[in-house]
Amino acid sequence: MRTEPFAGEELSRDDFLGGAVRLWQPKDGYRAGVDPVLLAASIPAKAGETVLELGCGGGAALACLATRVPGLNCTGIEMQPAYAALAQRNLDDNRLAGSVYCADLSNLPADVKSQRFDHVIANPPYFENFRAVAPRSHERAVSRAGALPLETWVSVASKRLKPGGAATFIQRADRLPELMSAFFGCLGALELWPIHPRSLRPARLVLLRGRKERRAAFVAHPPLVLHRGDNHERDADSYTETVSKVLRSPQSLPFPDLKSHQMRRNRL
C-alpha cells in the first residue's frame, strides 16, 4: 500500500460536472468514472446536513456532492494514505469544506465515531479478493478488490447514521444478494434502483438505499438507463439526456418518487 503522497508528475487534473469540479487523479492507479458521479447525484442532501463517505478514494463523490449542495459538512474515510491525502487536496482545491481521515473501517477515528450523520454513502470495491483479477498497480487492486465483506461496510454505515438517516451504496448487480442481505440486517425502508447500460441489457450496477430505524415496504424502482439505443456506437456520445445532464453539470438524480410509484401500483 502506498504511503507517500502522489508527486505532481504522477497526476492529471480532470474536469467533472462540465468543469464545475476539477479533480487530481493518478495517471496510473484508480481513476474515478461515472459511478461516484451517479452516486453523488442521487443523494437528497440539503445545506447544513452531514455526509460521511466510506472508502472515498480520491474524493470524487464527495467533491461532486458538495459542489451541487453548498453548505454540506463532508467527511471521508480512506484506508490508502496517498488517496486520503489526494481526496483532501481535491476538496481544498475546489474550495469545499470537508475532512478526510486515513483509516480502516474497522478502526474509525474517535472524531468520526463520536458523530452521527444524515447521509452515509459508499462505493465499495466491486470484487472480493478471491474473485478479483489483479490490476497493474497495487493501489488500483485495493480499490477494485476488498478484504472486508459488504456486511461490514453496511454495519459501519448503519452505526454512523442518525435515526432516519439514509445509507446509499452503489455496487455491481451481481453482488446485490449479498448487499441486500446486509441492508436487511440493520436498515429499513429499502429502495433499489437498477442501472442498465442500455434498455435491452441486464443491469450492471445498482443503487441501494436504506434508512436507520425506519420501516416501509421494499421498493424496486424502474431502471435507470445510461445509454440510448441497443448497441454501442463508436466515437458517439450515446448517454441519455438525463444521464448526460448529471455527468456534465451539478445536476441531481433523485430516486424515482415513491408517491408516484404507489399511485401507479394502486391503479394496476
Image (cartoon, rainbow, N blue to C red):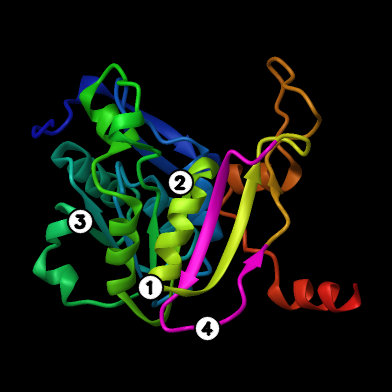
Q: Is residue 61 above or below residue 33?
A: below
Residue 212 in sight from this viewpoint: yes
Q: CA distance from mark 3 to mark 2?
A: 19 Å
Q: What residue did someone put label 2 on?
A: 36
> Three-letter amino acid code at disc 2?
Pro
Q: CA distance from mark 4 to mark 2?
A: 27 Å
Of callouts 4 and 2, which one flags the residue occurring earlier in the amino acid sequence? 2
Q: Nearer the viewer, mark 3 or mark 2?
A: 3
Q: What residue did someone put label 1 on?
A: 186
Q: Which mark is residue 215?
A: 4
Res. 67 image quadrant: bottom left
Q: Residue at x 23, y 55 (%)?
A: 77
Q: CA distance from mark 3 to mark 4?
A: 26 Å
Residue 160 in sight from this viewpoint: no
Q: Residues within 10 Å of mark 3 (few under 14, many from 20)?
A: some
Q: Which residues are magenta?
A: 202-220
Are the residues at dot 1 and dot 4 in contact (C-beta closer than 8 Å)? no
> Three-letter amino acid code at disc 3?
Leu
**Residue 212, position in %: x, y?**
41, 78
Of callouts 1 and 3, which one flags the residue occurring earlier in the amino acid sequence? 3
> Three-letter amino acid code at disc 4?
Arg
Of callouts 2 and 1, which one flags the residue occurring earlier in the amino acid sequence? 2
Q: Residues within 10 Å of mark 4 (few under 14, many from 20)?
A: few
Q: What residue did someone put label 3 on?
A: 105
Q: CA distance from mark 1 to mark 3?
A: 17 Å
Q: Residue at x 25, y 48 (%)?
A: 148
